[in-house]
């Protein structure tokens, strides 16, 4: 069934898969369910409050999504708040997490996101997920919110230097995560994409040491690069994609034995720290490898 506007009545079981918006912006809240059967990630809700990103990560999939134009664009915040109000009033909508960082960096406009986060505080059934590489957390720390989850994407220093242009250094992101956690937020961390560069075990071991000595995330999501066709087409620097020879339902990947080695390293290191395996997730990985690693169907974007 195609996605429809909130203003078109549909019944019972289908209501969980509807969209919410206004006449001008009908898909502000959009239920993403296009994950291929061969990929482990579950369906989730997108909050389409903006499009694009001010950062210049060489591997960013938004390059393909927006055909090379990642200049930030915003939906008028009033329309976003109307869509949220409609969703919050729908008693048939199960408690959900709304991911505001799928098509934009969630903190690229703090004044807009502050209004959205405040809207979530008017109810207790649904949560706002912020997904970011930014350190624009002042408004969050100043006023803690119970209905907001803050998820930081963090990589090691060498990957940051090579492919994450215009982003804050990893240590700054870790400190922002610590400040959010100290303020009472549920903090999640994505280490994604993990690149098996020379001495990758040293670099990522150092990252885990630094991260877990300062903040203890509620969830850590691991992922490796995905070379979607459009991403590869519009990426100006393809050095990050060298060695990605395996085809999958979510673009080209590094060969499965290498991915298994990388994930096994992280699982072992996190276990050494005493981090609960049940709080570790894989992103956009194959069902086959997830089963081999005995990982569940956990995800950064859902409960």
Image (spheres, helix red, strand yellow):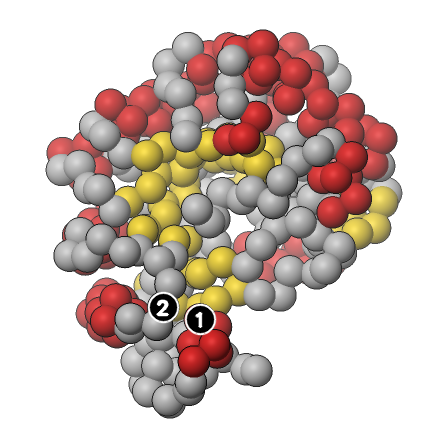
Residue 282 in sight from this viewpoint? yes
Percent coordinates x, y for residue 69 in the rendering: 52, 60
> Which circle marks residue 220 in the picture?
none
Q: Residue at x 78, y 48 (%)?
A: 252
Q: Which mark is residue 93?
A: 2
Instruction: Pick whichever, 81 or 287, lies toward us.
Output: 287
Count neighbours of disc 2 (C-alpha within 10 A) and say few if under 14, some if 14 to 19, many if 20 or more. Answer: some
Q: CA distance from mark 1 to mark 2?
A: 6 Å
Asked if the residues shown at circle 1 and circle 2 are in contact, with their CB atoms under 8 angstroms apart, the answer is: yes
* Residue 48 picture quarter: bottom left
The image position of residue 133, as x and y in percent, is 43, 37
Instruction: Decide if residue 255 is on the left or right side of residue 91.
Output: right
Residue furthest out toward the front: 12
Residue 273 vertical position relative to residue 285 in the rendered view, above or below: above
Label 1 residue SS: helix
Front-lying residue, 179 or 173: 179
- The percent position of residue 281, horizontal first and vertical second, equals 57, 36
| Residue 258 horizontal side relative to residue 104, left or right | right
Q: In this figure, which residue is indicated by the disc labeled 1? A: 16
Horizontal side of 60 relative to 106 (left or right) equals right
Quarter of the rendering containing residue 80 = bottom left
Which badge, 1 or 2, comes first in the chain's sequence? 1
The residue shown at (86%, 43%) is: 245
Image quarter for residue 15? bottom left
Q: Residue at x 59, y 15 (%)?
A: 271
- In this view, 46 is above or below 281: below
Please indicate, yes or no, whether residue 53 appears anywhere in the rendered image. no
Question: For the residue carrying disc 1, how many other residues have a C-alpha within 10 Å: few (<14), some (14-19), or many (20+)?
Answer: some
Q: Is residue 31 above or below residue 155?
A: below
Question: Does residue 131 sit above or below 164 in this rendering?
Answer: below
Determine the secondary structure under disc 2.
Answer: loop
Q: Is residue 263 left or right of residue 98?
A: right
């Amino acid at each position: 069934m195609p996605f429809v506007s909130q203003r078109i009545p549909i019944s019972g079981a289908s209501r969980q898969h509807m969209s919410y918006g206004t006449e001008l912006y009908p898909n502000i809240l959009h239920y993403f369910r296009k994950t291929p059967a061969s990929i482990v990630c579950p369906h989730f809700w997108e909050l389409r409050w903006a499009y694009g990103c001010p950062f210049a990560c060489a591997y960013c999939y938004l390059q393909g999504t927006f055909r090379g134009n990642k200049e930030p664009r915003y939906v008028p915040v009033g329309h976003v708040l109307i869509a949220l109000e409609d969703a919050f009033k729908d008693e048939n909508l199960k408690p959900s997490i709304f991911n505001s960082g799928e098509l934009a960096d969630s903190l690229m406009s703090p004044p807009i996101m502050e209004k959205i986060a405040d809207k979530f505080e008017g109810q207790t059934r649904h949560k706002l997920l912020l997904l970011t590489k930014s350190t624009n957390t002042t408004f969050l720390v100043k006023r803690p919110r119970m209905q907001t989850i803050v998820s930081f994407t963090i990589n090691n220093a060498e990957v940051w230097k090579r492919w994450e242009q215009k982003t804050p250094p990893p240590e700054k992101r870790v400190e922002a995560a610590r400040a959010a956690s100290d303020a009472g937020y549920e903090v999640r961390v994505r280490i994604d994409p993990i690149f098996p560069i020379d001495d990758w075990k040293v670099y990522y071991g150092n990252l885990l040491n630094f991260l877990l000595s300062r903040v203890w995330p509620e969830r850590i999501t691991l992922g490796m690069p995905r070379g979607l066709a459009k991403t590869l087409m519009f990426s100006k620097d393809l050095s990050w994609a060298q060695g990605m020879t395996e085809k999958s339902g979510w673009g080209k990947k590094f060969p499965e034995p290498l991915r298994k080695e990388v994930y096994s390293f992280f699982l072992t290191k996190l276990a050494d720290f005493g981090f609960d395996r049940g709080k570790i997730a894989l992103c956009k990985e194959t069902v086959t490898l997830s089963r081999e690693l005995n990982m569940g169907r956990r995800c950064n974007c859902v409960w």
